[in-house]
Image: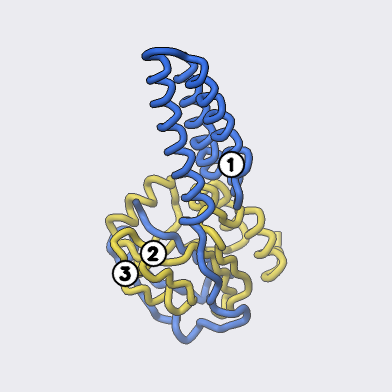
Chain colours: A blue, B yellow
Amino acid sequence: MREIAGIFLTLFSIMSYFVLATYYAVYQRVPLPHLLGCLVACVFLGFTVVRQKGWRRFTAAAALVFSLALTGFYAWYTLGYSTYDGDASAALETSFAAELGGLTLASQDGEPTEVFRTGDRGTLYVFYRGFW
Amino acid sequence: MELVQLQRALAEFQQRGIRIVALSVDGPEELALMKESAGAEFEFVSDPDAKLIGLFGIRHAGGRIDGADIAQSASFLLDSTGRLVWKRVAESYRVRPRPHEILEAVDRRLGKPAS
């Protein structure tokens, strides 16, 4: 039971981060509460390993290793992997009229789509990494 | 996901006369999947040769798992003449601008639409 509670807390700490970002636009550069949740789960499982005996100690140790691995992966992903090196993007006030005027690219239907239309009051381009 | 948030605020962007275009190096099939997954009604455009990604200076060299170049997560607002009036380039692709921040930038840089 304690093992399940520890793993549940680890998973909850990680999944809640993604739910908050996806559905509530809570973007955290350093997701401290979620990392703390994982840490608490690992400490709890660590105490469980020390207190249990026999096969219960083995299952607690397995749960601890699993939680530590998840926590390590989550920390690596949020603090290292997902960060960029610098910003070399176009400067404000740059005009893209010449480059974008008349340029067409394929839409989600495969149809040619004008990237820039002069009739719009403004255009918001949102670049994303891709579909995984 | 930023695209989900933008969809939720789509009416406010439309009210301001702002066209939203989502771009990535993906082909049309993947774009369609992403559009469906985000429940988005705005346009998705494929930039397989990273033409626009290069133009806006947001190439993430070798960023895809297979080593291909992809876009750095970023948002750019152009006015009706094609001038770049606002941008947000993510320092981490997990941290995106919220729709209300973009709408504030729209109102600040392009003015509020006549009601």
Residue at 42% x, 38% y is: A69
Residue at 46% x, 74% y is: A116
Count the labels in the image: 3
Give the image location of residue B100, x and y in percent: 65, 53
Question: Could you tell which of marks 3 and 2 lies nearer the N-terminus?
Answer: 3
Badge 1, how many Cα within 10 Å: few under 14, some, many 20+? Answer: some
Give the image location of residue B56, x and y in percent: 49, 76
Badge 3, how many Cα within 10 Å: few under 14, some, many 20+? Answer: some
Give the Cα distance between marks 3 and 2: 14 Å
Q: Chain of mark 1?
A: A
Which quadrant holds the C terminus of chain B? bottom right
Q: Nearer the viewer, residue A26 or A4?
A: A4
Give the image location of residue B107, x and y in percent: 70, 64
Mark 3 residue element = loop
Name the kind of residue labelled 1 in the image: Tyr
Q: Is residue B111 left or right of residue A109?
A: right
* Labels 1 and 3 touching (C-beta < 8 A): no
Give the Cα distance between marks 1 and 3: 31 Å
Q: Nearer the viewer, residue B112 or B38?
A: B38
Badge 2, how many Cα within 10 Å: few under 14, some, many 20+? Answer: some
> Residue reaching furthest bottom?
A98
Q: Nearer the viewer, residue A48 or B26?
A: A48
Q: Which residue is mark 1?
A: A24
Name the kind of residue labelled 2 in the image: Gly
Q: Which residue is mark 3?
A: B48
